[in-house]
Amino acid sequence: VQLQASGGGLVLAGGSLTLSCVASRRTFSSYAMGWFRQAPGKERECVATVSRNGRLTYYADSVKGRFTISRDNARNTVYLQMNSLKPEDTAVYYCAADRNRLVLTAPPRRAVDEYDYWGQGTQVTVSS
């Protein structure tokens, strides 16, 4: 599956952005989805993930209460709504798909190496 992320940009601290990621396949609902980020000089980390049916989510502690992940299986799209952005949220954000969640209601995973397909990344820069 091919993933196309968009929605990044430059925003002031305290502002909001919404990232979108469109998948190329109609079997989008077969994949758990995740958003990850990588800042310069740092390892890629999990931000948020969502189960195949959209009912189960996981958030990194650093974004809980500020970010919301959601998906629209009819539109083959996963979203990341980011509010109250901080300079430390500055990074390249990647969407990714996990093909190994065989059960529709299985909790989404969070490790980078558990995700099989990756989008090209979109830059988010938060200025203070």
Image: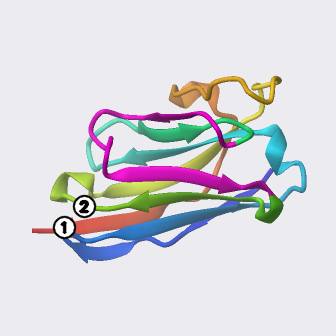
Q: What's the CA distance linking mark 1 and mark 2?
A: 5 Å
Q: Bin the neighbour count of mark 1 within 10 Å (Cα to Cα): few under 14, some 14-19, many 20 and up.
A: some
Which residue shows up at 31% across the image and 52% down it? Answer: 66
Q: Are marks 1 and 2 in contact (CB under 8 Å)?
A: yes
Q: Give coordinates of residue 8: x percent, y percent.
A: 43, 70
The answer to whether residue 14 is above or below residue 102 is below
Q: Could you say which quadrant of the image residue 30 lies in?
A: top right
Q: Could you say which quadrant of the image residue 32 lies in?
A: top right
SS for dot 2: loop
Say the numbered circle drawn on residue 14: 1
Residue 89 vs residue 49: left or right? left
Q: Quadrant of the C terminus?
A: bottom left
Q: Which residue is label 2 attached to?
A: 85
Q: Bin the neighbour count of mark 2 within 10 Å (Cα to Cα): few under 14, some 14-19, many 20 and up.
A: many
Which residue shows up at 37% across the image and 75% down it? Answer: 9
The colour scheme applied to this rendered structure is rainbow
The answer to whether residue 75 is above or below residue 64 is below
The answer to whether residue 98 is above or below residue 27 is above
SS for dot 1: loop
Which residue type carries mark 2?
A: Leu
Magenta span contains residue 84: no
Q: Which residues are magenta?
A: 54-73
Q: Could you say which quadrant of the image residue 113 lies in?
A: top right
Which residue type carries mark 1?
A: Gly
Which residue shows up at 27% across the image and 39% down it? Answer: 62
Q: Give coordinates of residue 112: x percent, y percent.
A: 52, 30
Frontmost residue, 6 versus 113 = 6
Q: Give coordinates of residue 78: x percent, y percent.
A: 63, 56
Frontmost residue, 10 versus 17 = 17
